Image (cartoon, rainbow, N blue to C red):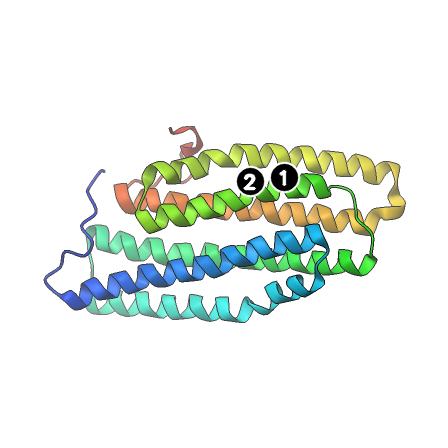
Amino acid sequence: MNENLNLHKHISSQFNDDLERVKTSVLAMGGLVEAQINDSITALIEGDSRLAQKVRDKERAINSMELDIDAECATILALRQPAASDLRMLLAALKSITDIERMGDEAKHIASFALKLSEDGEAGAGYEEFEKIGKRVRKMTSDAFDSFARFDVELARSVVNQDRGVDSAYHAATEKLLSKISDHPENLAQDMNVMWSLRSLERIGDHCINIAEYVIYLVEGDDVRHSGSKDKK
């Protein structure tokens, strides 16, 4: 199904405003979480406990935004009874904010691990790999939100395809860390904190894929989940 989007072309200007407000709110929430992700990565790499705590402190604001957007979408669904692309827009928004909130949770986890590593006062193994994967995940996050902002299917598909590189780098990094832990178990606590941080990065990438797939669904009406969409060009 390739029905063109027909947002912002309603008889009711209020309906137009409602849909635009939902989109703006989703992107605002995404922007806050993107900053959270960037700060958590920086906090761990640089051992910045103050920045890590700043990431943790944003959780309440993010949760509040999710609830507000959810309530706004529910009101529009009840009052406007949208169909076609308008309905897909609201469904994509509702699903996206769930993934965005979970991305924020993973950023908070990374910040918590950063605090523990900072308290230990020693760099664990895997920092170089964490920084490299963090760079990839930052790009995926930015591209996922940009694809939603512009309803850009090609960019959304590129996000899905970028996950291959993240997965490959993640598995290589964890294997390297496990080998290091086996040879030098005295640094187990620090190395495991890096390991779990890598896992959080990998999960953020998975949520980026979900958002990208919602964009494809929104624009094309095609649900590509579980359909081998990673192979699409």
Lateral position of residue 175 relative to residue 161, left or right: right
Q: Position of residue 109 (x, y in %)?
A: 64, 58
Above/below status of 166 relative to 12: above
Marks 1,2: beta carbons within 8 A:
yes
Above or below, 170 against 148 in this view is above
Q: Secondary structure at mark 1?
A: helix
* Mark 2: few/some/many CA within 10 Å (<14, 14-19, 20+): some
* Residue at 59% over, 56% down: 39
Given the current orientation, which residue lies at the most extreme left position? 11
Q: Seen in the image, is 204 located left or right of residue 77?
A: right
Q: Within 10 angstroms of label 1, few (less than 14), some, or many (20 or more) residues?
A: some
Q: Disc 2 on helix, strand or loop?
A: helix
Q: Residue at x 85, y 37 (%)?
A: 182
For the question of whether residue 17 can be seen, the reply is yes
User: Residue 30: x, y in percent?
Assistant: 44, 57
The residue that mark 2 highlights is 136
Does residue 102 appear in the picture of this structure? no
225, 104: nearer the viewer: 104
* Quarter of the rendering occupied by the C terminus: top left
Tell me residue 49's x, y (percent). 71, 62
In screen coordinates, is 107 left or right of 162?
A: right
Query: Residue 4 is drawn in which quadrant?
Result: top left
Where 133 falls versus 104 (above or below)?
A: above
- Tag 1 residue: 132
Q: Amino acid at mark 2?
A: Arg
Q: Residue at x 18, y 68 (%)?
A: 14
The quadrant in which the N terminus is found is top left
**What amino acid is labelled 1 in the image?**
Lys
Please tell me which residue is depicted at 75% across the width and 34% down the height of the picture: 176
